[in-house]
Amino acid sequence: MRALVTGGAGYIGSHMTLELVDAGIDVVVVDDLSTGIAAAVPARATFVHADIADQALLQRLIEELGVEAILHFAGSVVVPDSVADPLAYYLNNTVKSRALIETAVKTGVRHFIFSSTAAVYGMPGSEPVPESAPLKPLSPYGSSKLMTEMMLADASRAHDLRYVVLRYFNVAGADPAGRSGQSTPRATHLIKVACETALGKRPELEVFGSDYPTADGTCVRDYIQVSDLARAHSAALAYLAAGGASDTFNCGYGRGFSVLEVVETVKQVSGRPFAVRLAPRRAGDPAQIVASSDKIRSVLDWQPAYDDLATIVRQALLWEDRLPPRTA
């Protein structure tokens, strides 16, 4: 099989590319490097520096290389940025995804895996959140991803295209072999930011909101290790290749940690105290969201290998320690 990975120079996309090439699958990565890093693409993959909205280029690549599956990671992911600049998110996450889906249909690609988000649920009424929960995003980021889910569903009904949507909860950690990790400049992921602060790359860590209706007043999230997430995609690809019907799955472990619990874990694992400052809430952040992971475990037979917060933090710290100092 030959697979096309969009956004394969980014954090999650690079781990997915490693997962595929380790399995002996031929991979072509398309990334515009707006946030990705070319060095993150494994040497065994073919890298093309391009925008996924360049339909003529992608059509030629797919046809010439015989691409049979698309795994779509390219997009923008910062919730507060989407609130400040919603049209940019609808362009990058929705309009360009529409172009990619159309290219898949035109070239006869039958398998499509989409990187979605738990942000499509908004503020769920119960925990853990099943895939059947109402979809009420609180941010343009969540809405832009939900629109792509809807386009995929409609396109699959009209054409010979089957898909899996994977709704990520909070992704963290790094490749256990040290080949890739979260390298994005000015990243906002809590565990990365906490690791940067522990290593002296930031003067302090801001905690956004301490008055949420949770046990300690800070947001609660379900953290999934990035290589476990890549294996979920491999399971989804195998499911589609075996004739599985289009479907949607949550990607999380089914239990949550508050911001302050994560901060304390980073302090303990690193052995380094660091300054923490309470700040106002950020727009678009739900108080708590934890995955129901029963469906992905049963249907795709997905079993995580790194379901331990301290292990995830240790991987992130080791990777962060290898990176150059953060620039403003």
Image (tube, grey):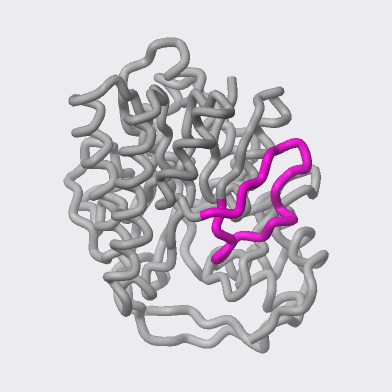
**Quadrant occupied by the N terminus:** top right
Q: Residue at x 59, y 25 (%)?
A: 2
Measured along the vertical axis of the image, is residue 57 above or below residue 214? above
**Quadrant occupied by the C terminus:** bottom right
Q: From the top left corner, tell me how far across and down residue 123 is, in percent.
A: 24, 58
Q: Residue at x 74, y 56 (%)?
A: 39
- Check the image and name the residue furthest to the top: 242
Q: How many marks are shown on the rendered structure?
A: 0
Answer whether residue 303 is visible to the viewer in this image: no
Residue 34 is one of the magenta-drawn residues: yes
Residue range highlighted in magenta = 31-50
Answer whether residue 259 is visible to the viewer in this image: yes
Q: From the top left corner, tell me how far across and down residue 102 is, in percent.
A: 31, 38
Measured along the vertical axis of the image, is residue 297 above or below residue 222? above
Q: Residue at x 44, y 40 (%)?
A: 251
120, 51: nearer the viewer? 51
Label the magenta part by its dominant secondary structure: loop
Q: From the top left corner, tell me how far across and down residue 101 is, in percent.
A: 34, 39
Quadrant for residue 89, please give it: bottom left
- 158 on left or right of 185: left
